[in-house]
Image: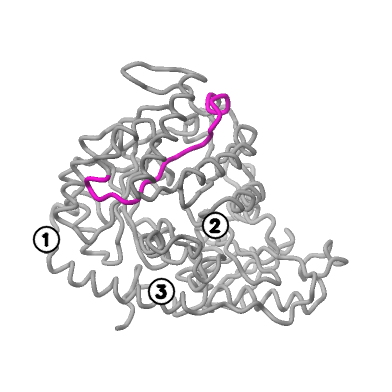
Amino acid sequence: MELPVISNNAPAAEGGGCSSSGCGTAPDGLAHLPDHIRAKVQDHPCYSEQAHHYFARMHVAVAPACNIQCNYCNRKYDCSNESRPGVVSELLTPDQAIKKVLAVAAEIPQMTVLGIAGPGDPLANPGRTFDTFRQLSEKAPDIKLCVSTNGLSLPEHVDEIAKHNIDHVTITINCVDPEVGAKIYPWIYWQNKRIFGIEGARILIEQQQKGLQMLTDRGILVKVNSVLIPGINDQHLKEVSKVVKAKGAFLHNVMPLIAEAEHGTYYGIMGQPEPTQEMLQELQDACAGDMAMMRHCRQCRADAVGLLGEDRGDEFTMDKIDVMEVDYEAAMVRRKAVHDAIIEKLEAERGVAKPKPTDIPAGSRPVLMAVAGKNGLVAEHFGHAREFLIYEASPEGVRFISHRKTELYCGGMDACGDGDVVEAGASESLLDRNIRILEGCEVVLCAKVGYEPWAKLEAAGIAPNGEHAMEPIEEAVMAVYKEIAATGKLLPQADSLKVA
């Protein structure tokens, strides 16, 4: 069976690329897990770096209330211009959520996962959350169910989670030390009263750890999210990783703090610095010694729809869904055919061992490269990219490191030059900002690069490369790495040299 289209007129990658090797892990990046756990997560887009290129997910915003306050959080409703957790365009009732899920699943057959992640805390809204899950279990049995929580109310809801066949739970755990927690959480709402400071953080940590243990004891899979906050928990997260692994969490997702002042969070208003890309990678690598690390997280909105890295929510607002006619029985037949075709392709890729590169001199240093990629290919023009995928090439091969969000500065031939205009009150142009975001990368691979960005990239010490358009990403990255190796600039005595 031919693999169906997985995005707006974009076919799935035909091989190679990030998807072929689990984005920098081993060919089966989850191979360390027991078979029964790996079977549950290897095709889950939120857990598998390989599957997220093919399977889609959606969140429904049915949980407005929250029982803790985080210094990095400011929930916004009726908001379409921000992409971060806690933001939604529409709050839904459970009945509206069901209608939306069925419509999306019928229209996007590769959507396999439904999660409730806010915009508040799902378990602070148990009636709305579990009513939604109950109806979905009955009406859409082919969709996997997930829930994300801060963990404060988790222990009292573990039985209900198991009852509704929710076998994937995400807990946000930013600390295991109350003194660190007091710098992150001003207060919690516990047993009908607000509790502040260290005492509130202590209760939250105890509940999180208790709930985590209860879930894993029941065989429910747990991923732990942690927000990296420089100067607050940056070193402490290594201990968090050890603790949650000991209690049975199977995956750790260390995410960078988002603290832009315009978002209105406490950290943003107070000028708390965000982590650098180097800081995030170093911590992820340090924690990877304790457990599997997730590196492809997009810190999704609470109403995200589509593949990771895209958001098709505007196509499925309630006014549009209300006029749709959905035959979900018929849709399930098509969905099964799509899922079977994707799984067949994934299984074939997992069976291919990736050899180490040849012709790379011993002792060669690694090189970071930014890729304007789509569906596993070098497919985007530099000025059209809204994010760049960051890869590391080394004598060991190619591994996916992270993604970096950028702003669209080129809207077409007539608008491309506008990207270099510095708006009133701004300190730099969009083009300059996007190039700054790529700091640390020595090469940027794109389908095409214009004259103006080409010159500015070179001035910033980043070599633009448009020679590998529409090639699988990993093959292109390794080809460029070998080209650099042939110049001798990867050897220790050439560390100070830039890529020509």
Separation (CA) of disc 1 from disc 2: 37 Å
Q: Left or right: 234 with respect to 68?
A: right
Q: Nearer the viewer, residue 158 or 366?
A: 158
Which-is-in-front pick, marks 1 and 2?
A: 2
Residue at which label 1 appears: 325
Q: Position of residue 416 (x, y in %)?
A: 54, 62
Tell me the kind of residue under disc 3: Leu
Give whichever of discs 1 and 2 has the lower sequence position: 1
Q: Nearer the viewer, residue 260 or 38?
A: 38
Residue at which label 2 appears: 403
Q: Position of residue 168 (x, y in %)?
A: 35, 50
Q: Left or right: 34 with respect to 154?
A: right
Which quarter of the rendered picture does the N terminus lie within? bottom left
* Residue drawn at point x = 62 percent, y = 73 percent: 477
Which numbered disc covers residue 346?
A: 3
Q: Which residue is situated farthest in the right direction here?
A: 493
